[in-house]
Amino acid sequence: MANSKRTLFLKRRLRVRNKLRKVNSGKMRLSVHRSNKNISVQLIDDVNGVTLASASSLEKDLGIMGKNNVEAAAKVGAAIAERAKKAGVEEAYFDRGGFLFHGKVKALADAAREGGLKI
């Protein structure tokens, strides 16, 4: 029986996250979620279980309300880099979840790197 897309996504997400946890213990996690209509990112401290900063295409002040394209992802990436600096975080590891590192996810990561966040 063939695996569904959702099952494959969940397997890929667990595989990626577990590998990252082994390699990057002690660093903050930059977690990305992409839906059909929006993209969001959180900077998470897994040791304390706290979200330090977040950014989303649903925020009105970014000027991309409800858009989900490469330009919107780049703006969200720049915003999270700025908010991470305010929170005192300069280095994090990029948790793409089950999403492929391509298109919107890649644009977000590149914009965060350009904003000064070491990923």
Image (spheres, rainbow, N blue to C red):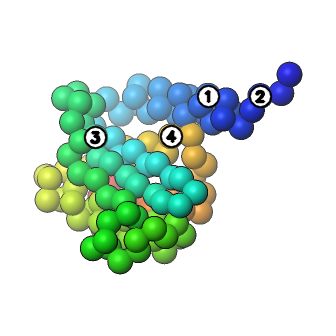
Alpha carbons under labels 3 and 1: distance apart: 21 Å
SS of the residue under disc 3: strand
As helix, strand or loop, the secondary structure at mark 4 comes to: loop
Work out whether mark 4 precedes mark 1 in sequence or the reverse, and give the earlier one: 1
Q: Label 2 is placed on what type of residue? A: Asn
Q: Is residue 19 visible?
A: no
Q: Nearer the viewer, mark 2 or mark 4?
A: 2
Cα distance between the residues tagged 3 and 4: 13 Å
Residue 86 lies in what quarter of the image? Answer: bottom left
Task: Classify 10 Å Cα crowding around label 3: few (below 14), some (14-19), many (20 and above).
Answer: some
The reply to whether dot 3 and dot 4 touch (C-beta < 8 Å) is: no
Image quadrant occupied by the N terminus = top right
Q: Do residues under tags 1 and 2 come within 8 Å of each other at their CB atoms?
A: yes
- For the residues marked 4 and 1, what is the alpha-carbon distance in whole angstroms? 10 Å
Badge 2 is on which residue?
3
Please state the horizontal and vertical placement of residue 80, each as a whole percent of the image.
30, 60
Amino acid carrying mark 1 in the image:
Lys
Q: Residue at x 28, y 40 (%)?
A: 44
Question: Quick one: SS at disc 1?
Answer: helix
Q: Nearer the viewer, residue 56 or 106?
A: 56
Disc 2: CA contacts within 10 A as few (<14), some (14-19) or many (>=20): few
| Amino acid type, residue under disc 4 in the picture | Gly
Q: Where does label 3 land, which residue?
A: 44
Earlier residue among tags 3 and 4: 3
The residue beneath circle 4 is: 97
Q: How far apart in space, not on screen, are marks 1 and 2 (Cα)?
A: 10 Å
Q: In the figure, is residue 53 to the left or right of 30?
A: left
Q: Secondary structure at mark 2?
A: loop
